[in-house]
Image: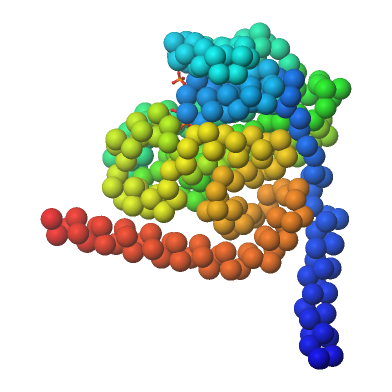
Amino acid sequence: MADLSFLALLLLLPLALLFLILYVIVRPCPVNIPIKNRHVFITGGSSGIGLALAHQAATEGARVSILARSLDKLEEAKNYIQLSTGIDVSIFAADVRDYDAVSKAVEEAGPIDLLIVNQGVFVAEELEKQGLDEVRFMVDVNLIGSFNMIKAALPEMKKGEDRGPRSIALMSSQAGQVGIYGYTAYSASKFGLRGLGEALQQEVISHDIHVSLVFPPDTDTPGFAEENKRRPPLTGIIAESSGAMKAEDVAKRALDGIKSASFIVRCNFEGLLLSIATAGMSPQRSFVMAFLEVVAGGLVRLVALCFQWSWYTSIQKWQAQSKRT
Ligand SMILES: NC(=O)c1ccc[n+]([C@@H]2O[C@H](COP(=O)([O-])OP(=O)(O)OC[C@H]3O[C@@H](n4cnc5c(N)ncnc54)[C@H](OP(=O)(O)O)[C@@H]3O)[C@@H](O)[C@H]2O)c1
């Protein structure tokens, strides 16, 4: 009995010590970002996840601005949010690829507390078949457009230290954590956001600005429905493992993650596994998550390898079958 207690102590002591070390060292320090009565600016806020985010933020008492290209869709979104929450929404018609247009919108909207860079376009196709114009389109809207938004909003956001902690959130994708067949351009544009976010966090931390990266799985939105029409069959087979979430559920998870200033915001259980598998050198504020990353890292790598095995087996089978027919 005494031996057993000694063994348990031997096992628990290093874990407790690890917990304590992580509690002391995780950086940046934990922080909460209030949203009530604050200005939330959402790009791509007229449809899908962005619209659900705008609705959720308005429900939680934020002043909401949304930006997208189509004025008609913006008006529709504004009316929908106003009718269901009673909150007025400011709308801005601009293309994120146009720096002058987004600068003007940001100036008109007034100081931003939470900037959610959510706009995105996705066309799945094998690189060999996809035109370079479409590759450029995705990189321009998803990556360069995000730079434009941040460059336009950052100077004024930096001046807002008296308003409390502020946030810059970037809408990535699970295809921004792991490369998926048919997503060469899309994945590249979303992986790029991670580098942007990791470096930017170091540059803005002293201004009490906190960066979040949201990694949704397939989500039922107008954009997703459109993309599905052209998706290569193999992309469907591989991405199927994650299943499609509702935009409202993704928005709720995303906003909760942004409010707790998590650097990596996951939306489902698979997202949890992916965030552990790809933790790498990314910042971590939660010592509990840091503990999971350290302790479960090896096991999650094994799960990741099983996924890779299943994906490559599907690819091999599909290609063998295509050759036969
Ligand atoms: N749905 C998914 O399965 C999924 C999964 C993972 C990640 N995501 C990411 O989540 C974000 C939202 O996706 P969603 O599915 O909600 O898409 P969506 O329904 O197609 O909505 C996209 C929004 O972005 C706006 N937008 C597109 N191009 C723009 C541009 N050049 N300038 C300004 N606004 C632009 C659109 O409005 P206009 O067309 O009027 O400009 C619309 O408001 C994207 O970043 C996407 O990559 C989506």
Q: Quadrant of the C terminus?
A: bottom left
Q: Can the viewer see residue 168?
A: yes
Q: Nearer the viewer, residue 234 or 83?
A: 83
Q: Residue at x 40, y 34 (%)?
A: 224
Q: Is residue 212 visible?
A: no
Q: Is residue 28 left or right of residue 217?
A: right
Quarter of image, res 168: top right
Q: In which quarter of the image is the N terminus?
A: bottom right
Image x and y of residue 251, in percent:
57, 34
Image position of 195 (left or right of 246) = right
Give the tally of numbered discs.
Answer: 0
When the figure is inspected, residue 319 is found, relative to residue 67, above or below; the finding is below
Identify which residue is drawn at 36% across, 61% down.
Answer: 312
Instruction: Please report the residue visible at 47 percent of the width from the left and 41 percent of the height from the top.
Output: 245
Rendered position, 69 above or below 206 = above
Give the camera-side residue of 190 and 109.
109
Color encoding of the figure: rainbow
Name the spot of residue 69 as percent of width and height, x first. 47, 15
Residue 202 or residue 23, whichever sits in front:
23
Residue drawn at (66%, 12%) of the image: 109
Q: Residue 233: image x %, image y %?
A: 28, 47
Relative placement, left or right, of 228 versus 264 is left
Against 16, residue 106 (above or below) is: above
Q: Position of residue 45 (x, y in %)?
A: 54, 22
Residue 244's place in the image compared with 279, above or below, is: above
Q: Looking at the image, which residue sits at the far left?
A: 325
